[in-house]
Amino acid sequence: MPRLILLLLVILAPAVQATLTGRVVRVIDGDTVVVLAKKEGTVRVRLSGIDAPENGQPFGQRARQFLASRIAGRVVEISGDTRDRYDRILGTVWAAGRDINAELVCGGMAWAYRARSEAQNPAYLQCENAAREQKKGLWQAPSPVPPWQWRQPLRPRL
């Protein structure tokens, strides 16, 4: 079922209009990378529509490794030109025509983003539900803590 969802994402996705093309020179965590682009130089990119566990959180390192195994050192295309408050580009990362953001969610390495309705991607929500049902990745844990809760300032760190 998740492979079908990924296939549909690729087939039904609009033609990728890259706003940036470059080589991934660093994977910071499960949803942030540094890309070296020809004109722009080094640019931080936050994968939009998803939220991966933080590095100090359970499954955080696994999410980072999962992402690195797919794109570290590779040339990728980034679709999206919005910047967040940390001046990172918010975008979908495409490698060989594959939506890497979706692969993280479908693989159980990230949550579909839900904070603002305009940022929600229904396909990512379906991927998350499928990964949860199949107990993939972080869904193997009995009660995984979403990163937006983990980041709360008063939350004790484990």
Image (spheres, grey):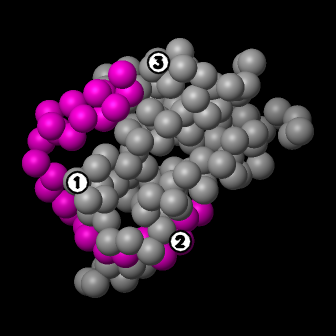
Q: Is 122 located above or below residue 87 in the figure?
A: above
Q: Secondary structure at mark 3?
A: helix
Counting from the top left corner in percent of width and height, residue 101 is at 40, 44
Tag shown at residue 151: none
Quick check: is 7 in the magenta stretch? yes
Which mark lies nearer to you, 2 or 3? 3
Query: What residue does disc 1 label?
Result: 97
Q: Residues within 10 Å of mark 2 (few under 14, many from 20)?
A: some
Tag shown at residue 26: 2
Q: Earlier in the sequence, mark 2 or mark 1?
A: 2
Query: What residue does disc 3 label?
Result: 129
Amino acid beneath label 1: Gly
Q: Which residue is depicted at the point 28% across and 84% down?
A: 38
Residue 78 appears in the figure: no
Q: Is residue 131 left or right of residue 102?
A: right
Counting from the top left corner in percent of width and height, residue 128 is at 47, 25
Q: Which residues are magenta?
A: 1-28
Q: Secondary structure at mark 1?
A: loop
Counting from the top left corner in percent of width and height, residue 96 is at 26, 59
